[in-house]
Image (cartoon, rainbow, N blue to C red):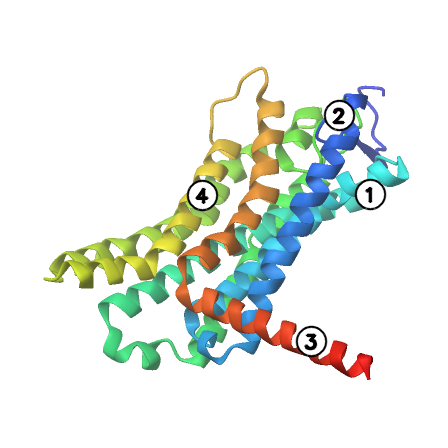
Amino acid sequence: MDKNNQNVTDFIITGISELPELQAPVFLLVLLLYLCTLVGNMTILILVCLERKLHTPMYFFLGNLSILDMSSTTVTLHKTLTSFVTKVKLVSFVECMAHAYFFMALECTELLILAAMSYDRYVAVCNPLHYHMIMSYRICILLAAVCWVSGFVEVIPHTCILANFTCYTSNTINHFFCDVLPLMKISCSDVSLLKLWIATEGVFVSGLIPLSMTVIPYIFIILAILKIRTSIGRRKAFYTCSSHLTIVTLLYVTLYCLYLSPASENSLDSHKLFSLFNTAAVPLLNPLIYSLKNKEVISATKKLLNLVCAKQSMNFNVSKY
């Protein structure tokens, strides 16, 4: 492709691996991760909707997190899956910009939802007597709405700047979806404005503010836990926060490795690996962590399975007669 080409209409997505012998194993791995992510998060969502014991603020936000995980995984992995079947790796310019926008928007929204969950845990531990009054249904809806709207609005400038790039040294993106860094890598337009915007608004507004809103409540939570006299009470208080804290740590460490780690010669290959972990493994781990560490979720899962098994048994007995 000519270095001075001003009319890029399509990009070629290389995928996770360009080696022909790895195409089938990579496809099967990605398909398995994708299906497990959908099943795990959909199960959490169904449990939160059907089980009355899970009609609490924490599980309301967990349901939002499940929707975000399923959406983010679909946005980033669907091209890898479809290109293996159709053998078409082309993606239009508009579709590529849409990939970048929705990925960034969903990631920013997830960070804000995790911050809202952190505030919920703070109220539960530090102000339990007024928990249901402070974290009312109306407040939860309002917090979730603010998170979703803010996440989708704050990345509009990034996408607009990216969409105005008119010059590319190549139309081949060394990635499995249209992410900002690989697009900047092949652009011969002036990327200084986008770099400045990412370094300021991206890091401080999209990153540090949600991180602060997540960490500060935990400082008060830890101080409150340390004041509890009995070890059983301290263990119980920490247990209510452990699942959320695990997910927060996983996500922020992965995002740090993706966007703030020092650049190297193999940075794009490393970027693909961390992106795969962030978009496939982390959304799969979220429902597993909450399922394995929360007695309410385990109890609701068993109840749902028993209900399904009883219904199947009833249908089988009816069909016999």
Residue to which mark 4 is pinned? 250
Vertical order, 34 against 141 (above or below): above
Foreground: disc 3 or disc 1: 3
- The CA distance from mark 1 to mark 4 is 28 Å
Q: Identify the amino acid type marked 1.
A: Thr
Percent position of residue 170, x then y? 78, 23
- The CA distance from mark 4 to mark 3 is 41 Å
- The CA distance from mark 2 to mark 4 is 28 Å
For marks 4 and 3, the one nearer the N-term is 4
For marks 1 and 4, the one nearer the N-term is 1
Residue to which mark 1 is pinned? 82
Vertical order, 202 against 243 (above or below): above
Q: Identify the amino acid type marked 4.
A: Leu
Where disc 4 sits, the SS reads helix
> Dots 3 and 1: beta carbons under 8 Å?
no
For marks 3 and 2, the one nearer the N-term is 2
| Residue 101 is at least partly visible in this image | no
Q: Identify the amino acid type marked 2.
A: Leu
Residue to which mark 2 is pinned? 22
Packing grade of label 3 (10 A; few <14, some 14-19, many >=20) is few
Q: Residue at x 69, y 37 (%)?
A: 29
Where disc 2 sits, the SS reads helix
> Dots 2 and 4: beta carbons under 8 Å?
no
Tag of residue 270: none
User: Which one is nearer the viewer's eye here, 259 or 239?
Assistant: 239
Residue to which mark 3 is pinned? 313
